[in-house]
Image (cartoon, coloured by chain):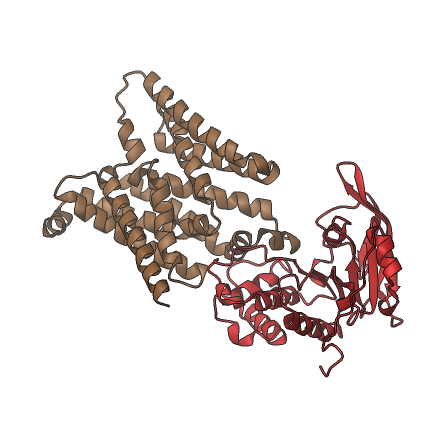
């Protein structure tokens, strides 16, 4: 741990990694809470995996893969949302299809890119230690967009997440706010890909919020606690992975997974006593 | 029935699904202080009629007016209490927060719930007898308390017409009587339509019984006979009289 703290003082890449972790944790805590209470983890997983298609196409065309990821995530989110809203029975099939087709398209496009040298593993499992300063700006802007929209429409999102049918009765534009929520999930997925990669996104999106949900009474507090937990898991994962040279993204997920397991066990024991 | 202006007017209403008619030639008026029971066999279109009144379906033919307005224009005038809570009981929200969601849609608003919303929620919770539960999570409520929460949420828009879909489906018998006493109190300032299968019980409280099975026939509360019920359900039925404390002091 001391080795990590010393390195943090001198290495800019570690400082960037920690700032990236902070930025991602806030978005994760807020949007992850909606994913958990609305039980749409599978949907978020579908968006995350399908994003590889957009990254592959962008890479093939010589564009920034993260821009491809952003565009693809939003498109897939809207597509899944429309299928859910208007062809409800087919939602699972649509998610599964987009999940697999997106990944397949990404792998094919990357394999066909002239001078193939991209590290596919960094897309799949992330590389938080390689986050450049320019990427931090993109993350900051995405974070602000997500938080701003959530703050503005917090009542509407609460109504759609809590009781969709009643929101319709009250005349709320449920399809609009549902699709907007999915777009925010897509933005958060793109934020997370840089850090933990698209395969592990779903863990960071759900685990901190799931733990927080066991201890708080309101969605607002769930978001706040989930953000703090996300930050703690990021910092702990980075510190633990540094000295032995473990992959940082995977270590962060292992820390979050262990904390979730521990929390479930503690809650179980406490409830059994009562 | 009191002589009063109708809050609900339904004229020549037809509606159905996928070309199959479910409701035909419905003509109905409900006075602004009436307490009406809507009864009928399963699949007779009771909940569908509610959804038409709420503006969630559009009639094939005919028109609906609530205080002179279309259902879409009259959303604030109609309170709705579903048969079952359509939300997860483990959702992280307090009783007060859940009731506040009833203020949504009344007017375009951004950011969080206002002090005015919270005061209105506190008033609604006092009215349904849940004031001391305001800060508790909804997971801590019993079935009867949850039903009262749904009523409090419906009161947030200050409705003139309250629609309740089998509000006592998950409530025991003492709870049932207590809930109907509450509805009778609310009836002093709004019209109430309650879907029920228990004609014997609700006739103690309501002013009229509307029998629905494709078409709608209204009877004064005390005048529904076993023959009326049998004709509506299409098979032999028995009327059961409940001995409740409905006649007691309120």
> Can you say which quadrant of the picture contains the N terminus of chain B?
bottom right
Camera-side residue of A217 and B239: B239
- Quarter-wise, where is residue B4 in the image? bottom right
- Chain painted in brown in the figure: A
> Can you say which quadrant of the picture contains the C terminus of chain B?
bottom right
**A169 up-or-down from B103: above or below:** above
**A231 up-or-down from A76: above or below:** below
Q: Residue furthest bottom?
A: B249
- On the image, the x and y values in percent for residue A33 come to 42, 52
Instruction: Please indicate whether residue A142 sits to the left or right of residue B237 in the image.
Output: left
**B36 up-or-down from A22: above or below:** below
Number of labels in the image equals 0
Q: Specify whether residue A215 is in view.
A: yes
- On the image, the x and y values in percent for residue B61 come to 84, 44
Residue drawn at point x = 52 percent, y = 73 percent: B133
- On the image, the x and y values in percent for residue A141 come to 38, 45
Residue drawn at point x = 12 percent, y = 47 percent: A7
Residue drawn at point x = 46 percent, y = 39 percent: A43
- Chain painted in red in the figure: B
- Quarter-wise, where is residue A49 in the image? top left
Instruction: Please indicate whether residue B232 sits to the left or right of residue A175 in the image.
Output: right
- On the image, the x and y values in percent for residue A9 come to 14, 50
Camera-side residue of B135 and B142: B142
Q: Specify whether residue B9 is in view.
A: no
């Amino acid at each position: 741990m001391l080795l990590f703290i010393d390195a943090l003082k001198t290495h800019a890449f570690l400082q960037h990694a920690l700032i990236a972790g902070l930025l991602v944790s806030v978005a994760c805590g807020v949007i992850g809470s909606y994913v958990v209470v609305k039980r749409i983890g599978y949907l978020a997983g579908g968006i995350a995996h399908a994003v590889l298609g957009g990254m592959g196409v962008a890479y093939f065309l010589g564009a920034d893969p993260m821009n491809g990821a952003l565009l693809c995530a939003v498109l897939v989110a809207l597509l899944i949302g429309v299928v859910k809203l208007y062809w409800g029975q087919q939602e699972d099939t649509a998610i599964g299809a987009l999940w697999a087709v997106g990944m397949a398209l990404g792998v094919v496009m990357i394999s066909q890119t002239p001078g193939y040298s991209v590290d596919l593993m960094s897309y799949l499992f992330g590389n938080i230690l390689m986050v450049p300063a320019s990427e931090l700006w993109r993350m900051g802007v995405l974070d602000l967009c997500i938080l701003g929209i959530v703050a503005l429409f917090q009542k509407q999102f609460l109504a759609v997440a809590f009781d969709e049918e009643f929101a319709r009765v009250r005349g709320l534009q449920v399809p609009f706010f549902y699709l907007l929520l999915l777009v925010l999930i897509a933005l958060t997925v793109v934020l997370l890909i840089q850090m933990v990669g698209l395969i592990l996104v779903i863990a960071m999106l759900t685990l901190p919020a799931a733990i927080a949900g066991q201890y708080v009474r309101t969605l607002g507090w769930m978001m706040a606690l989930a953000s703090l937990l996300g930050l703690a898991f990021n910092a702990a994962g980075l510190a633990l992975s540094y000295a032995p040279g473990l992959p940082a993204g995977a270590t962060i997920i292992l820390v979050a997974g262990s904390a979730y397991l521990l929390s479930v066990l503690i809650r179980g024991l406490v409830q059994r006593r009562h | 029935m009191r002589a009063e202006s109708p809050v609900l007017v339904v004229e020549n209403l037809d509606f159905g699904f996928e070309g199959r008619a479910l409701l035909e030639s419905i003509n109905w008026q409900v006075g602004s202080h009436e307490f009406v029971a809507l009864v009928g066999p399963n699949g007779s279109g009771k909940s569908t009629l509610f959804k038409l009144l709420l503006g969630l379906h559009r009639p094939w033919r005919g028109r609906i007016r609530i205080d002179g307005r279309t259902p879409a224009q009259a959303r604030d005038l109609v309170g709705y209490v579903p048969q079952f809570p359509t939300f997860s009981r483990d959702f992280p929200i307090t009783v007060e927060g859940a009731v506040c969601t009833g203020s949504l849609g009344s007017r375009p608003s951004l950011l969080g719930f206002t002090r005015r919303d919270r005061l209105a929620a506190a008033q609604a919770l006092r009215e349904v007898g849940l004031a001391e539960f305001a800060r508790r999570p909804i997971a801590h409520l019993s079935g009867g308390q949850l039903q009262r929460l749904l009523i409090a949420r419906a009161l947030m828009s200050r409705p003139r017409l309250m629609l309740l879909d089998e509000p006592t489906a998950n409530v025991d018998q003492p709870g049932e009587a207590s809930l109907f006493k509450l509805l009778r109190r609310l009836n002093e300032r709004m019209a109430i339509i309650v879907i029920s299968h228990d004609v014997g019980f609700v006739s103690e409280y309501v002013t009229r019984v509307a029998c629905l099975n494709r078409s709608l026939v209204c009877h004064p509360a005390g005048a529904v006979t076993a023959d009326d019920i049998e004709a509506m359900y299409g098979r032999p039925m028995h009327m059961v009289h409940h001995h409740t404390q409905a006649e007691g002091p309120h």
